[in-house]
Image: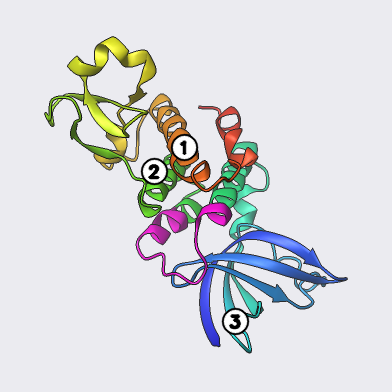
Amino acid sequence: MQFKDEGYIVALRKYGENSLIVTVVTKQHGLLCGFVRGAMSKKNLGTYQIGNLISTDCYARVDENMLSMKCELLMPTAINFMNDGAKLAALSGLCSLVVACLPENENLERFYYYIDSFFQLVNEPNWRVHYAFFEFYLLEYLGVGLDLSECADTGTTENLAYVSPKSGKAVCAESGEPYKNKLFMYPHFIVDKNYNPTPSEVADLLKMTEFFLNKNFFQIHNLKFPPNRASLLENLAL
């Protein structure tokens, strides 16, 4: 088996004296985990950094074997996170969710767009919004997306204001008002594809995605919710 792809480094693990086990999230093959000989040499140190965009030539003698990789740096995107605590926290959260949730050897199709957007637009003023879109569509990719089309109580599509933590469905203002302290806020900026929401809207969305990712994916699969993601809101200054 041999193929080429490109993507972002999301995990690194030392192997032996100067080699690494490298995990890359790619569009065509999902997560790729492979062995890179000599990755920790002085020549290669700049390439193997979490967050960098690389191309990789992958080979395995049989499908069951770990991949051997030869990688080339396409863009040193890791540098965009180096001196910013909030961006580093978001990078750590994204990488931990990607490693825990995404499959190996599966085409991510359109979902990869939200991963790529986060890395490519992290220097924009609204970079936190691109992270929020990633988490929202991660729910959809995992098959546990929210139903925001109409009120679960009345069926109306107007004046939607909340999301039920029990059903993951929208609730209109009138039906939700008596229970608003127990409901999540409706993410209008996601539905409207508005990339300039208020910081409080982004924070509300991330509280909701954390809840549903934990409830509908991690708990179902008996997995621990990633600590790096659990502490994210404390570090984003929203």
Up-down: is 49 above or below 236? below
Q: For marks 1 and 3, give the CA distance.
A: 35 Å
Which stretch did the figure color magenta?
A: 98-117
User: Foreground mark, 2 or 1?
Assistant: 1
Which residue occupies 36% across, 65% down?
Answer: 109
User: Foreground mark, 1 or 3?
Assistant: 1
Q: Residue furthest top?
A: 178
**Which tag, 1 or 3, sits closer to the chain's start?**
3
Q: Is residue 115 shown in magenta?
A: yes
Q: What x and y, as percent, mark residue 193? A: 27, 43
Which residue occupies 62% across, 85% down?
Answer: 60
- For mark 1, give the secondary structure: helix
Colour scheme shown: rainbow
Asked whether 87 or 157 is in front, the reply is 157
- For mark 2, give the secondary structure: helix
Q: What x and y, as percent, mark residue 148? A: 24, 37
Which residue occupies 76% across, 78% down?
Answer: 37
Q: Which residue is mark 1?
A: 215
Viewer can see residue 174: yes
Q: Are marks 2 and 1 in contact (CB under 8 Å)?
A: no
Up-down: is 118 above or below 208? below
Asked whether 193 or 101 is in front, the reply is 101
Q: Which residue is mark 2?
A: 136
- Looking at the picture, which amino acid does disc 3 mark? Cys
Where, by quadrant of the figure, is residue 172 drawn?
Answer: top left
Q: For marks 2 and 3, give the CA distance.
A: 31 Å
Residue 92 numbered tag: none
Asked whether 167 or 228 is in front, the reply is 167
Q: Which residue is mark 3?
A: 58
Q: Residue furthest right?
A: 17
Q: Are marks 2 and 3 in contact (CB under 8 Å)?
A: no
